[in-house]
Image: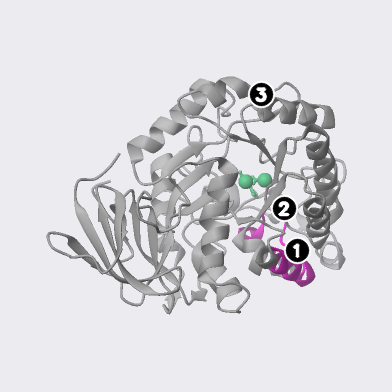
Amino acid sequence: MTEQNTILLRGASLLGEQGADVLVVDGVIAEVGSPSAEGARVVDADGLVALPGLVDLHTHLREPGREDAETVLTGSRAAAMGGFTAVLAMANTSPVTDTAEAAERVHDLGRAAGLVDVHPVGAVTKALAGEELAELGLMARSRARVRVFSDDGRCVANPRVMRRALEYVKAFGGVVSQHAQDPDLAGPQSCCHEGELSGRLGLPGWPGVAEEVIVARDVMLARHTGSRVHVAHASTAGTVEVLRWARSQGIAVTAEVTPHHLLLTTDLLGDYDPTYKVNPPLRPAEDVEALRVALADGTIDAVATDHAPHARHDKEHAFVDAAFGMLGLETALPVVASVMVETGLMTWADVARVMSTTPAAIAGLKGQGRGLEVGAPANIVLVDPSADVTVDRDASVSLSRNNPWHGRTFGASVRHTLLRGRPTVLDGSLVQEH
Ligand SMILES: NC(=O)N[C@@H](CC(=O)O)C(=O)O
Ligand SMILES: [Zn+2]
Ligand SMILES: [Zn+2]
């Protein structure tokens, strides 16, 4: 899918470095430097940082089944507004994405929306039940070319099933993304980091070790099978320690962290506000600090949003009864900029790596996460690095309102997003023909 028009991004700072003009012709970066603007539509990018379009390894789009919370179209809008050009759509829909047909349906809905590339994640097990493997091979060979498999929302708890899945996906270079939550150590009611606060609030505890034992087990299964494991939403310092060891051994394990686990802490649960109820739960400051360090030093490979929209009537309940999850697509980049760039922990080039290049590589996406070099598809986001923007949940293009960032002010914002040279967002607004 290419566009015939010509666009000149004038004066963009490439990965936060030198300023240059970028000429996009027919959806491809044709020239970088000082190309002629003749006949081109000019986008003023003076003072803006140009990054490769962001890639989200972990998004919940809720279609089919919960179109009251989000659809592929509305989630695609939120993604484009957040600077994304590709998202991986989790399989915990209704019905579950556990067949080739189901995967192709999500893929086709993404095409029809046309705002970001939507890649369905395939379930590991039928109906996410944790027992029988889903149609992994058929999903891989389908039009949707599924490469990432996950029972996210549930843990693949049975080690024999996990082993089989890893052996199976190895044949076509697939990866299993694990929601690491040992169901005996942290059951379905567990909703607050286990510690002094969970005791005081009387909320069922979710100890970090319930994540860490699964990560440790899966690291050993990755070593044993020679197949790839990806750790979804890593949330504890103990998980970071295991990952560091795995990396030192050359084991094929990758991991992501969410923006909320990089900034929000468990004490926000003190008012029993279900907006802050998420899986895994918000952790203490020591864990947050360890996650930041691990992202900066490469122990954690990627940032993924775990955008988890929920309808009001599922979220506005007593804390224990409310749904798990929070919005994330529109705010991911501002949060990462504030936590990692404004603190000096990372450069913009590092942000490009953890939010675009590496996630694209983990998911096996071609044409995404490329550098801003001549010949690459023009998947580009332009970021204002000195903005002053206050999040308003009612201004969101998502269908849901479970936004933990409402009222917070950030210093970076997405100005323009280009999908293969076609603007999906201009001046911070959706390009409405879609
Ligand atoms: N993260 C969440 O709290 N919720 C996710 C499921 C998940 O990512 O485990 C959801 O689907 O709502
Ligand atoms: Zn999960
Ligand atoms: Zn999730």
Disc 1: CA contacts within 10 A as few (<14), some (14-19) or many (>=20): many
Q: Residue at x 33, y 35 (%)?
A: 112
The answer, for residue 398, to whether it is visible in the render is no
Q: Is residue 399 magenta?
A: no
Q: Amino acid at mark 2?
A: Pro
Look at the numbered discs 2 and 1 and tell me whether their residues touch, using CB distance below 8 Å: yes
Q: Quadrant of the N terminus?
A: top left
* Three-letter residue code for mark 1: Arg
Q: Amino acid at mark 3?
A: Lys
Q: Nearer the viewer, residue 11 or 390?
A: 11
According to the picture, the residue beneath numbered tag 1 turns out to be 283
Helix or strand or loop: what does disc 3 sit on? helix
Residue 126, label in figure: 3
Query: Magenta residues, as a range?
Result: 271-294
Q: In the depicted view, which residue is nearer to us: 109 or 310?
A: 109
Q: Which residue is mark 2?
A: 280
